[in-house]
Image (cartoon, rainbow, N blue to C red):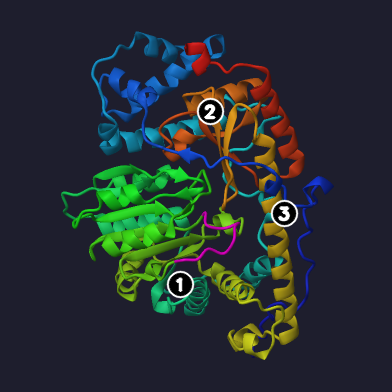
């Protein structure tokens, strides 16, 4: 008896409803707002160095964490929730002098920031400090219920499950999905000429970089450290530091562009690996592409350049250098940010075919392969994103021919699915950009320095009265029940920089922004420079 398979996109479904915005947000706002060309430097300052100088063992990240939190608790005084840590801070005394270079080269620094990252989520925000009515602007992700996966992509997942496509697969991912990703990425990077041999599907960005570090650095002998640009994401940096000495390299943001000059200066012929974000978290600043090309060209063939491109979205199509496709470059992408699906843990990496061939053995031995029931979703979104990039408004027999006949697709069904996908993506991008612009405008206050993000859903907001971003978070949460993300947790090692995630529903944002305006406008912050001076 012949089994009849379901047809992909056989029945049109309603697209996701558009997110309504107030009429005032229906037009771009930032063009009317004067924005100063800010320079942000992320290296350690004296305030952070004081923690190392007072520690009994400055190589103990847990002690650094406790002293750092204890100082904030001491400043909060009667609002402290861990008085024993405040007492520990008061009992400490300076024991040594510590230089910025020592902090940036210390293994303890990477682990200290990761300990603070864990403490923030586990012990503070979703632990002792959790209260009803909190407004969370610290998630770093899109509100999935408002701007989740396009209906077309969700249909693909449902279809794969209906076909029982969850068996074993190639450790690099199914060939049609890899072929679709290769074509999409070749369209994004003219001159790249990727094919499926350059692609491995992964279980998201964090997992991919952890795997690359494990694959490329385990048992590698070198006297040179890996170089890690900061700001950066603590789990990624920890993945490097567990395997090889790691030097943190502050890369300043100047007028919304990240300079890679410090990375270039520290390159050595035996540098094993360089990790950087092409659009920085938390600033949304894009790397200087000319400097990125210089970095890649000057790196030795044995130096692996890992580009985390996951935040490089929600902005104009960048003009990328062909150097991004060099043999010693690995590019990492994920569905977490651009497609609002952090919980699916799906993404891909692009590299030379030789790298992917060797990575196959690592993947096969380490985790087998990515979840197979997402392959159809990846294939469809990659093909449809390429069509959007190429300006296609309709699909016909040529587009239909890109898919296997086993899907049972028709021109009409594929056309309706593509129109739905393209409309949802366009509406989502427009709404998120307008929301980000309005949040930027609202946060331009007398006591703030706001970096207007060129990409991403995050804003970097400097609170002038604070020397400590964790204290700023605690003070704002305590007084107004609004959570922001301390800059320290992205390796912003100085000042009161906090991250604000703008991809939330306007009904939540407007209340949170009003509370922040009240907080910043009506009081002097605890532990402020003015109060200390």
The residue identified by callout 3 is 431
Q: Quadrant of residue 485?
A: top right
**Residue drawn at (58%, 58%), measured in percent from left and top?**
338
Question: Is residue 435 visible in this depiction of the protein?
Answer: no
Q: Secondary structure at mark 3?
A: helix
Residue 340 percent location from the top left of the image: 61, 55
Image-based side of 421 in relation to 463, left or right: right
Q: Is residue 389 above or below residue 144?
A: below
**Residue drawn at (31%, 54%), measured in percent from left and top?**
274
Whether label 2 touches label 3, CB < 8 Å: no
Q: Residues within 10 Å of mark 2 (few under 14, many from 20)?
A: some
Q: Secondary structure at mark 2?
A: helix
* Magenta-colored span: 311-320
Q: Is residue 313 magenta?
A: yes
The residue identified by callout 2 is 124
The residue identified by callout 1 is 173
Q: Report the predominant secondary structure element of the magenta stretch.
A: loop
């Amino acid at each position: 008896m012949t089994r009849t398979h379901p047809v992909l996109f056989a029945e049109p479904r309603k697209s996701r409803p558009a997110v309504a915005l107030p009429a005032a947000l229906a037009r771009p706002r930032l063009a009317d707002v004067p924005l100063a060309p800010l320079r942000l430097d992320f290296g350690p300052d004296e305030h952070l160095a004081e923690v190392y100088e007072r520690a009994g063992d400055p190589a103990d990240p847990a002690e650094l964490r406790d002293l750092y939190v204890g100082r904030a608790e001491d400043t909060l005084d009667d609002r402290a929730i861990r008085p024993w840590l405040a007492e520990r801070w008061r009992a400490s005394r300076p024991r040594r002098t510590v230089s910025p270079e020592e902090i940036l080269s210390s293994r303890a620094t990477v682990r200290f920031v990761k300990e603070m990252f864990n403490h923030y989520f586990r012990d503070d925000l979703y632990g002792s400090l959790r209260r009803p009515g909190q407004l969370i602007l610290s998630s770093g992700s899109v509100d999935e219920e408002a701007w989740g996966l396009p209906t077309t992509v969700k249909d693909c997942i449902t279809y794969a499950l209906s076909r029982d496509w969850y068996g074993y697969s190639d450790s690099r991912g199914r060939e049609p999905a890899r072929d679709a990703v290769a074509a999409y990425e070749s369209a994004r990077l003219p001159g790249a000429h990727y094919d499926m041999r350059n692609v491995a599907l992964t279980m998201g960005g964090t997992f991919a970089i952890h795997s690359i570090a494990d694959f490329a650095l385990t048992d590698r002998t070198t006297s040179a450290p890996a170089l890690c640009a900061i700001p950066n994401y603590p789990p990624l940096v920890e993945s490097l530091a567990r395997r090889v000495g790691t030097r943190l390299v502050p890369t300043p943001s100047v007028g919304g562009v990240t300079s890679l000059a410090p990375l270039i200066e520290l390159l050595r012929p035996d540098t094993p690996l360089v990790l950087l974000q092409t659009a920085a978290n938390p600033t949304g600043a894009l790397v200087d592409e000319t400097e990125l090309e210089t970095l890649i060209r000057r790196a030795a063939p044995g130096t692996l350049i890992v580009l985390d491109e996951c935040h490089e979205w929600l902005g104009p199509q960048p003009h990328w250098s062909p150097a991004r496709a060099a043999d010693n470059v690995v590019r990492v992408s994920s569905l977490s940010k651009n497609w609002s699906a952090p919980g699916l843990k799906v993404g891909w990496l692009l590299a030379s075919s030789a790298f992917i061939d060797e990575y196959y053995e690592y993947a096969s031995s380490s985790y087998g392969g990515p979840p197979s029931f997402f392959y159809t979703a990846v294939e469809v979104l990659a093909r449809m994103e390429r069509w959007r990039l190429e300006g296609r408004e309709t699909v016909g027999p040529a587009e239909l021919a890109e898919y296997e006949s086993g899907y049972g697709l028709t021109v009409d069904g594929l056309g309706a699915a593509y129109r739905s996908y393209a409309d949802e993506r366009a509406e989502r991008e427009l709404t998120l950009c307008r929301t980000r612009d309005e949040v930027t405008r609202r946060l331009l206050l007398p006591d703030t320095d706001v970096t207007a993000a060129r990409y991403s859903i995050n804003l970097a907001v400097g609170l002038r009265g604070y020397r400590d971003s964790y204290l700023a978070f605690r003070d704002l949460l305590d007084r107004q029940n609004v959570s922001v993300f301390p800059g320290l947790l992205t390796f912003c090692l100085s000042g009161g920089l906090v991250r604000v995630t703008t991809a939330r529903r306007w009904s939540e944002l407007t209340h949170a922004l009003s509370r922040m305006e009240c907080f910043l406008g009506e009081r002097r912050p605890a532990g402020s420079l003015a109060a200390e001076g």
